Amino acid sequence: MKKIIKYISIVFAAAVLVTGCETNELDLTVSPNALSPTQADPNLLLNSIQLAYATNQTDFNDLGAQLTRIDYFGGRNYFNALDGATMNGIWSRTYASGGNGPGDFANVGIQTNLQALEQIDAESETDYSFHVAIAKTMYAHCLFQLVDMLGEAAYSQAGNAAEFPAPLLDSGQDVYASAFTLLSEAENLLASNPGTQGAIDFFYNGNVDNWIKVINSIRLRSYKNTGNKSAFDAIITGGDYIASSADDLELQYGVSELQPDDRHPDFAAGYTPSGSGPYRSNWLMNLMLQNDDPRIRYYFYRQANGTPGAIDTNGNAVPPNEETISCSLFVPPAHYAGFVYCSVDNGYWGRSHGNDEGGPPDGFLKAAPGVYPAAGRFDDSQFGPVDAITGVLLAPGVGLGQGGGGAGIEPIILSSYVDFWIGEMAATDAERATALENGLTKSMAKVQSFGGLDGSADLSFEPSAAEVTTYIADKIAAFNAATGDDKENIYANQYYTSLYGGSFEAYNYYRKNGYPTTLFPNWEPDPGPFPRTFLLPQNEVLNNPNLTQRTDLTTQVFWDTNPASPTFPVAN
């Protein structure tokens, strides 16, 4: 894959081309202030669409991960923490303009550029079917996801400002149906194996077969959500979907720090001169530690061998520390009985769900993103050396350019994810066990392939093939032996762990199935109902007189037929 730095530069050029084209012709038939979309370069328009799509996927993944404890969520009250601005960027990038991300200066959104591409294709002698097909695929995927987040979205009146200056929202069912139609249109366009016409394909270098697999895999995730087993099974039987790591839909990042920064966002925030940024999730680190999960050294890089209030790597108790982890001095509240309230053992220094305490001086102490998927450091138990007398850190555990330099990936749809979807839709426990085994096997191989990105790591700390095989076999045996909630929790825990880095579908799974029931509760005893959907994007509400902002987060997506909040999901 090409490095994203090249894409960002190209997209910036696209924005200039779309909004500020010049001409030397004196006899103009089109005003330079009202240029036709056909005067834009279709290759640059497609680049803009791809970058907007990739930025959306990053945001979708982050939100899904935080709500399902795969990543840390820092809000005691869900409604206050997830305000109307939360969806502004995703919404605007999907439809009309940028917002809150590296693709923002592209000036026009996925739908706007798609419409321009369709007009260019219709009026040009050059076949731009590839461009239109890829754009339709990305637009469809984002529409599915908008419904999953909001319960409804704009479609039938979107992108037609002359007739519908204040578009109404369509129902979730209608938008899902329209998105499926877009995928069929994209598939038909790709059937003739159209050429790229010089376009840069961020993901598959113009391989049409891979894009057909993406289309079918997007269908799979959407059939999974709606419970359409017959349609789901038909695609699996056909075999034309993302089934191996070679087919994975992912965005490749680079190592450039400036002009522009094309590193993985988690690396950029986690490897700075002032230490690591956002916290890692106590729930996931504790789960993987207790399970002795072979992937833990790839996911997290520990800067300290112990966390105040817990046990260090030598089995010794680490004294509480009010300055670095004030909660290490707290008595856990009643609703946290049986859960790790503050500190995870063995130096997995993070925070629990909803902890909104201020930022102490722990930038060179807390766990940082590992080598997967952010291309940070592989955890080989080096830790940051500390002066025995002063306690001052002698060599930072994180910093610019360390590990893999940020040249990681943004997972979007991986083959391991699809195996877990197959298990979710399976008719028997035996089929689910097979899917669980396949998903774990592919996840382990994918994660372990990142170890070599950290050239300074002592890879003797990598798990052996026998350890990985034993881990998978033990999980399958435990799943087969368990019943009821225990069986469901084993499956969900392994699914969530495998989703690390690309976790949007965990949010769908949690609302649809309610598992795992073992998620850490919110730091606050009464955080409000778990968000079944989000508030409408506030920017759209303010500019669209036909919309009224919601007053809660309890609206359910059409496929979420579970009991109303707050009784479901039970872990909340």
Image (cartoon, grey):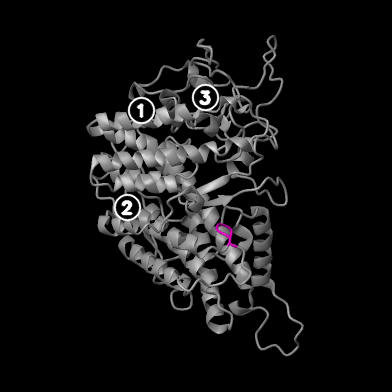
Give the crowd class for mark 2: few <14, some 14-19, many >=20 residues within 10 Å. many
Measure the alpha-carbon separation of dots 1 and 2: 27 Å
Instruction: Tell me if residue 155 comes above or below residue 39 in the rendering.
Output: above
Q: Range of the magenta residues?
A: 201-205
Residues at badges 2 and 3 in contact (C-beta under 8 Å)? Answer: no
Which residue has dot 2 on it?
A: 224
Q: Which residue is mark 1?
A: 474
Q: Could you tell me residue 482's position as x and y percent? A: 25, 29
Which of pointers 3 and 1 indicates the residue nearer the eye?
1
- Where residue 263 sits, quadrant-wise, is top right
- Residue under pointer 3: 348
Regarding mark 2 in the picture, which secondary structure is present there?
helix
Quarter holding the C terminus is top left
Q: Position of residue 49 (x, y in %)?
A: 55, 63
Point out the residue furthest to the bottom here. 27
Instruction: Examine the rendering and report whether any part of residue 155 can be seen.
Output: no
